[in-house]
Amino acid sequence: MGKLISGKAVSTSLRAEIREKALALREDCGIQPGLAVILVGNDPASQIYVRNKQKACEELGFHAFEYKLSENYTQEQLLDLIGVLNKDNKVHGILVQLPLPDHIDEQTVIHTISPEKDVDAFHPINVGKIMIGDYDFLPCTPAGVMELIDSTGVSIDGKYCVVVGRSNIVGKPMAMLLLHRNATVTICHSHTKNLAEICASADILVSAVGKADFITANMVKEGAIVIDVGMNHDENGKLCGDVDFADVEPKTSFITPVPGGVGPMTITMLMKNTLHAAELKRPK
């Protein structure tokens, strides 16, 4: 039987650390970490994410700057707002909630955010820094996954890790973070041949494909650590992951549930990045 990795417990512990450091920064040099969150349009899921980020800022003693913009807001107006926030010394992190309306180009927006305030770590400069292992910020979900793996006490060094999914947000950076910790890494995707066999040889399996119950027991090695990044809904509308939990859990040593696994970590890592951005402004 696999032990559950509680994202909630790991996240709570990390948030306590972040809160202490934020308070110390404020007391030492009067810097209060500030996060600007921009939401364009009325996407219900995005509204929930933004509300949760606002709540996290309040909980940790951060300054939250919230911009709720209509879906008719133009790309030019959005870029102008980002330009203003780039120069605002009270704002240490800028997050533009994705997805954006069709008339706004995501890449142009990401490129406009100052790399020093890019707490999502999506800017090409930050992506390049992650590649070479000399970074200020890590993408929030992969960074959260690393914290969850570390919470098991199992060393990543020398392990064979398989990442299913090759997105710029999770799959690719996930592979780089594992590689930086001396794992041997394979990235699988929709064109991978012998997918089940490759997954079944992994000591650590990370699934980020966005397909409900995609990973089944025959794809999992006995005693593996399984991390489920998927956020899907089953035919009854219930939240579920990429992993067929009931089928897979008995074979694992550790496994993350959905909900309550990777989910709670993402906003916590965003807060950690924002704190770090603020700490970089500490007078030398």
Image (tube, rainbow, N blue to C red):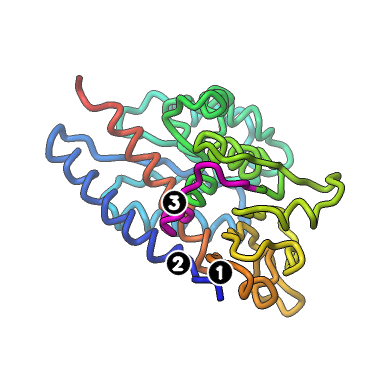
The quarter of the picture where the N terminus appears is bottom right
- Give left or right: position of 59 versus 84: left
Q: Which residues are magenta?
A: 147-161
Q: Residue at x 52, y 60 (%)?
A: 263
Helix or strand or loop: what does disc 1 sit on? loop
Instruction: Say whether residue 246 is visible.
Output: yes
Q: Residue at x 30, y 27 (%)?
A: 280
The residue under label 1 is 257
Helix or strand or loop: what does disc 2 sit on? loop
Helix or strand or loop: what does disc 3 sit on? helix
- Residues at marks 3 and 1 touching, judged by CB atoms closer than 8 Å: no
The answer to whether residue 154 is magenta is: yes
As rendered, which of 173 and 22 lies closer to the eye? 173
Q: Earlier in the sequence, mark 3 or mark 1?
A: 3
As rendered, which of 223 and 41 lies closer to the eye? 223
The crowd level at tag 1 (other Cα within 10 Å; few <14, some 14-19, many 20+) is many
- Give left or right: position of 20 versus 216: left
Amino acid type of the residue tagged 1 in the rendering? Pro
Q: Is residue 110 above or below residue 270?
A: above
Q: Earlier in the sequence, mark 1 or mark 2?
A: 2
Q: Position of residue 75 (x, y in %)?
A: 63, 32
The residue under label 3 is 147
As rendered, which of 100 and 240 lies closer to the eye? 240
The residue under label 2 is 6
Q: Residue at x 37, y 44 (%)?
A: 272
Q: Earlier in the sequence, mark 3 or mark 2?
A: 2
Q: Position of residue 284 (x, y in %)?
A: 20, 19
- Residues at marks 1 and 2 touching, judged by CB atoms closer than 8 Å: yes
